Amino acid sequence: MSKLESRTLKWLADTGFTVRTPAMWTAALTHGSTGEHDNYERLEFLGDRVLGLSVAHWLYDAMAEPEGTLATRLNAMVSRQMCAEVARGIGVPEHVRVSKQADSDGGRDSDNILGDVMEALLSAQYLDNGFQAAFDLVHHLWRPALESGDGSRKHPKSALQEWAAGNQRKPPEYEVIGKSGPDHKKSFTVRVRVHKVGEAEGTASSKGAAEREAARAFMERYG
């Protein structure tokens, strides 16, 4: 396994992570497409639980709301999309290790990959420094979303999924219909279609973000 680059070590420290076992942090930033055995998959499994408990604790202390409301807010705050947004906000894409093909396909800015890496990094923080350190970091990185109420709003794709089900329609179908730009700055265009209702398009720098824009455009037009 490759060693952590000096710029990545500095970025981790500047962001609030404390690296004691470099190999584990390298794994946390490594996608399976690289072919390396030590990648983020096992770390992501644990990090998901670290994040969930940390956010649940914050909500329990901060909100005098019934269980159902807390559960809805928790699900939004620990969603793959929210994890990816936090990851982008701290600069994770520049440090993710993916294959050339995955990078060309937009993997470096994929919601799925960034969300998994973000959880893997929280797992590494927990394993290297204990739960309190991971807990404090979650509160620091998620605080803007937690305090702004962002997690109380449905993700566009979730909103569209629920709208389609509520109107007895087939699930939305997403399709990449355009991809342009150099590898380091790609642009994706996605079309979403609901059978016997209509379709809408969205364009963004990643497939996941383009799907969100398409879902948002669909709901504005037909919802």
Image (cartoon, grey):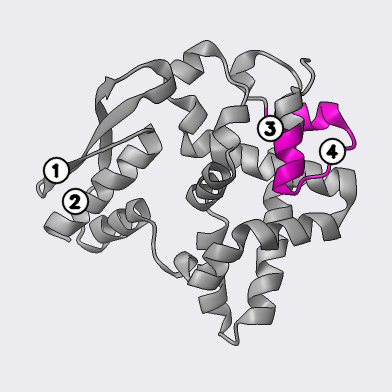
Q: Residue at (55%, 32%) from the top-left corner?
A: 93
**Which type of secondary structure does the marked residue at label 1 adopt?**
strand
Count of numbered marks: 4
Confirm whether the magenta stretch covers residue 17.
yes
Residue 141: image location, x then y, percent: 64, 56
Q: Quadrant of the C terminus?
A: bottom left
Q: CA distance from mark 2 to mark 4?
A: 44 Å
Q: Earlier in the sequence, mark 4 or mark 3?
A: 4
| Type of amino acid under label 3 | Glu
- Residue beneath label 2, please? 218
Q: Nearer the viewer, mark 4 or mark 3?
A: 4
Residue 109: image location, x then y, percent: 47, 32
Are the residues tagged 1 and 4 within 8 Å (C-beta)? no
Q: Residue at (31%, 38%) from the top-left corner?
A: 210
Q: CA distance from mark 1 to mark 3?
A: 35 Å
Q: Which mark is residue 177?
A: none
| Type of amino acid under label 2 | Phe
- Say left or right for 183 vs 170: right
Q: Earlier in the sequence, mark 1 or mark 3?
A: 3
Q: 13 or 66: which is nearer to us?
A: 13
Q: Quadrant of residue 20?
A: top right
**Which type of secondary structure does the marked residue at label 4 adopt?**
loop
- Residue beneath label 4, please? 19
Q: Say whether residue 197 is visible.
A: yes
Confirm whether the magenta stretch covers residue 203.
no
Are the residues tagged 2 and 1 within 8 Å (C-beta)? yes
Crowd rating for badge 2 (residues with CA inside 10 Å; few <14, some 14–19, many 20+) = many
Crowd rating for badge 3 (residues with CA inside 10 Å; few <14, some 14–19, many 20+) = some
Q: CA distance from mark 4 to mark 3?
A: 19 Å
Q: Residue at (61%, 39%) from the top-left corner?
A: 116
- Residue beneath label 1, please? 199
Q: Residue at (34%, 51%) from the top-left corner?
A: 157
